[in-house]
Amino acid sequence: MPLTRKIRNGRPFIIGTTVTVADIAIAKIYHGLDADGVADWYGLTLPQVYAALAYYYDHRAGMDEQIRALIRRAEDLEERRAGGEHSLLP
């Protein structure tokens, strides 16, 4: 299996890349890309994409919670940016 949980903040990713299983799931399920499209977008092989999707479906509840957390974080960051908060400024 070309996946590991050892780095990337404990999130499973494809070995030799920085692409996480969540990235693959979001591209396939939420953005509607087919496996070939996901492979092309991330520069992966089809076996890598299918391994990531198999992992996603085997761990769907936990992966969906991880994806929800990523979405919440992105929304929070966007809200701060839109609100004029600049964390680097006093």
Image (tube, rainbow, N blue to C red):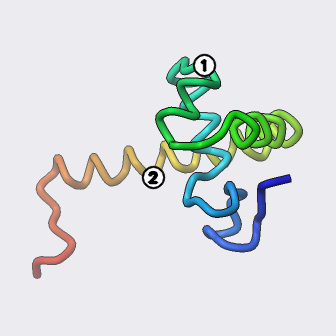
Is 11 drawn above or below residue 32 in the view shown? Answer: below
Give me the residue at 11% from left, 56% from top.
84
- The crowding category of the residue bearing disc 2, from other C-alpha atoms within 10 Å (few below 14, some 14 to 19, many at least 20), is few
Residue 58 position within the rendered picture, expressed as x and y whole percent measured from the top left: 88, 38
Q: Earlier in the sequence, mark 1 or mark 2?
A: 1
Which residue is denoted by mark 2 in the rendering? Answer: 73
Of residues 19 and 82, the one nearer the viewer is: 19
Extreme residue in the front direction: 45
Real-space CA distance between mark 1 and mark 2, rounded to the nearest whole angstrom: 26 Å
**Callout 1: helix, strand or loop?**
loop
Query: What x and y, as percent, mark residue 44?
Result: 59, 43
* Location of mark 1 (residue): 34
Tag of residue 78: none
Give the residue displayed 11% in from the left and 77% down from the top: 89
Q: Residue at x 60, y 26 (%)?
A: 28
Of labels 1 and 2, the one closer to you: 1
The type of residue carrying mark 2 is: Arg
Q: Amino acid at mark 1?
A: Asp
- x, y percent for residue 61: 80, 39
Q: Residue at x 11, y 81 (%)?
A: 90
Q: Residues within 10 Å of mark 1 (few under 14, many from 20)?
A: few
Q: Secondary structure at mark 2?
A: helix
